Image: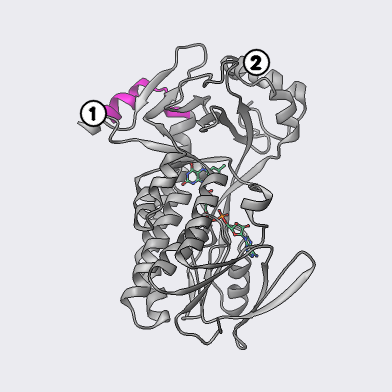
Amino acid sequence: MTGADPKSLTIIGAGLAGALLATLLAQRGWRVEVFERRGDPRLQGYAGGRSINLALAERGLHALRAADAHGAVLEQAVMMRGRMVHPLGGEPQLQRYGRDDSEVIWSVSRGELNITLIDAAEAAGAVLHFDQGLDSVDFDARTITCSGNGETHVHPFNALLGCDGAGSTLRAQMGAQRDLGERTEWLGHGYKELEIPPAADGGFRIEPNALHIWPRGRYMCIALPNDERNFTVTLFMALHADAGNDDPDFDSVVTAADARALFERDFPDTLPLIPELEHDFVANPVGSLGTLRLDRWHLGGDAVLLGDAAHAMVPFHGQGMNCAFEDCVALADCLESHADLATAFAAFEADRKPDATAIQDMALENYIEMRDLVDDPEFLLQQALERK
Ligand code: FAD
């Protein structure tokens, strides 16, 4: 493939958005090359780094259907028909997402999903290069420099599609050409992942078909089921102490004993479920959370950003991946309906930016709802009335 080939597109990142976009574009006749910083997860195992599982909603499923990848994904997914709220000292209660099981969301493993989409991209004809992380772009010479495993390669390109996530290198390279109006609003809260393993008989230890929430005011735990019959538990709380309250924070809950004391006080019903609490709490990293805002997503017809590279968001609406998947379909459609790349990228940005901004704002609002309001009877009554 040559960089001058007008029917060729180069995707940076073979994560969730990159692999789906490669599939959609290859299916529509584009010659697609993908450069991914990590090794091939099918050979080396999946090196995640982010959440172990994710909530897949109708927005994301719709995009997977467009690539004919939904069947393979749903085979490995666990249905969640509502949120199971665990009040302190009370009985858990299921709040359904819809009237019946036609309105549900799905818990999917990030690693399994990524591998399914990488397989789909290759089957559609895309060429994937692993262990080739983008280092720099020469927009005049129309070449990219990628490296990995001690080797550096220069590749020509026709146009670059940035699916390299929240810390996007392509975004930084584009920003050096033209101010993208980039700013990140840090939430000040972080997360840590823990595990509820399968029961002794191999089954799930708690209700599998629900997204579990332990709301505690300004912090919370959630748990999503995995098809291996375990749950990934995520503790969300402030990174640093707040002078205005006595809430726990990741600066002061550090040791195994700190973790045990926190869970004994605030999440006592989870203690028998998380046998490795102390070990996992100390071993697993604290992730930080923020909202990335950009004024511009594209550089003429040379490069465009999508997914987290364009609009990373806090995870409380479970929509970052779903929104990234919608971007992929929208960009593939724009590339089909516009003759030149600059017009297609501009149309894509005009179509998706308002939606992405709205979803980013809803994700911030939903943190308050999940950690505080889901066990508030007045709030629940109001919601029920609004649904009528
Ligand atoms: P990524 O998934 O980050 O993929 C980027 C890819 O680019 C990676 O493969 C990376 O290795 C590669 N890469 C990076 N740099 C380079 C480089 N220089 N060169 C080449 N390759 C590179 N979303 C939901 O929809 N539902 C949820 O329930 C949900 N839960 C979440 C929970 C947590 C705790 C977090 C942090 C996020 C959650 N999200 C959720 C958001 C979701 O993870 C992201 O929106 C999604 O991963 C975005 O996909 P992406 O492909 O844009 O980026």
**Residue 253 in sight:** no
| Secondary structure under the numbered disc 2 in the rendered image | helix
Farthest left residue? Answer: 388
Residue type at tag 2: Glu
Residue 254 picture location, percent across and down: 75, 30
Q: How many labels does the image show?
A: 2
Residues 125 and 333: in front is 125
| Secondary structure under the numbered disc 1 in the rendered image | helix
**How packed is label 1: few (under 14 Cα within 10 Å), some, or many (20 or more)?**
few
381 falls in the magenta region: yes
Please report the residue visible at 68 percent of the width from the left and 67 percent of the height from the top: 132
Q: In which quarter of the image is residue 96?
A: top left
Residue type at tag 1: Leu
183 falls in the magenta region: no
Q: In which quarter of the image is residue 36?
A: bottom right
Q: As displayed, is residue 174 above or below residue 237?
A: below
Residue 100 picture location, percent across and down: 27, 29
Residue at mark 1: 385
Is 348 situated left or right of 108 in this image?
left
Closer to the chain start, of discs 1 and 2, is 2
Q: As displayed, is residue 97 above or below residue 120?
A: above
Q: Give the position of the C terminus as an image quadrant.
A: top left
Q: In front: mark 1 or mark 2?
A: 2
Residue at mark 2: 264
Magenta-highlighted residues: 372-384
Q: Give the position of the N terminus as an image quadrant.
A: bottom right
